[in-house]
Amino acid sequence: MLPSPTVAHAADGTPIAYQLQGDGFPLVLLAGQANTHRWWDGIREDFHTTHATLTLDWRGVGDSGKPEEGYSTPEFAEDVVAVLDALDIERADVYGTSMGGRVAQWLAARHPQRVRRLVLGCTSPGGPHAVERDMTVRRALAQPDQRAALATLIDLMYTPAWRADHPGPYRTLGDPHLLPHARRGHLLASNRHDAWDVLPDITAPTLVLHGDEDRMTPADNVPLLAARIPDARSHLFRGARHAYFEECRPAASDLVHDFLTTDL
């Protein structure tokens, strides 16, 4: 019999499952749209020399509750706060990728006292100021042939050269048990994200990371975020796609680790 997951409860009562590993200053790792904490498998260990890593399953995925409501990036950020409160964590470093980066923007802007340092990966500010993926990508992901759509998603995540040496299974392709209403909720949360007006409120030192061949979330969003967030710095991984954090490991993890542990 599997043990019961460790959960906190969001403001609306939704159980939010979380996973805490390691010792040290807390590092919150936020996964992409419709994904569980497994997104970070094989990566989180890179930070355990200095940090305890904290992941969670977004509402609607994994071991968290599956409510009909509450799917937006600001509300996801409040779910993260509920987990921090349950663990009596007053302040943490935060590393969010893809939709997790969108959530991290709200977390750092609305709760600046909770975020010591911030890393935003393969993400965008959302709204009319963002550079969106082109219609070719959108149509390929939305096509009715699910096997073809999955092949498109894998190709957007990883380069062919990397896939040749790493045939999977991949952990970044979404929760396979996702219910239809949660799938819609996560899609709308990402599509409706617009943190442009609050980005200047971020006070945490910020590092923006991206793969320069990312077509899922174009790298043209990097200078937008870096210019909008006070004193942010950025780095592009050459030849990398959306899952740069996995394909460019250990270089990406080393860069993040140095940013989190070096005096600025």
Image (cartoon, rainbow, N blue to C red):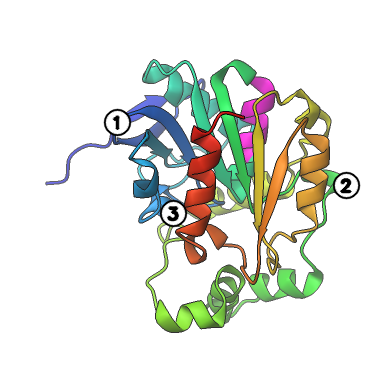
What residue is shown at x 22% (from left), y 37% (from top)?
Answer: 4
Magenta-colored segment: predominant secondary structure: helix
Q: Residue at x 17, y 40 (%)?
A: 3
Q: Quadrant of the C terminus?
A: top right
Q: Is residue 56 visible?
A: yes
Residue for badge 3: 39
Type of amino acid under label 3: Trp
Other-residue count near label 3 (Cα within 10 Å), few / some / many at <14 / 14–19 / ≥20: many
Mark 1 → mark 3, Cα distance in angstroms? 20 Å
**Label at residue 128:** 2
Query: Which SS class for mark 1?
Result: loop
Outermost front residue:
263
Mark 3–mark 2 distance (CA, rounded to whole Å):
28 Å
Mark 1 sits on what residue?
23
SS of the residue at dot 3?
helix
Name the one closer to the observer, 27 or 180: 27
With respect to residue 194, does 84 lie above or below?
Answer: above
Q: Which residues are magenta?
A: 103-111
In percent of width and height, residue 193 lies at 73, 42
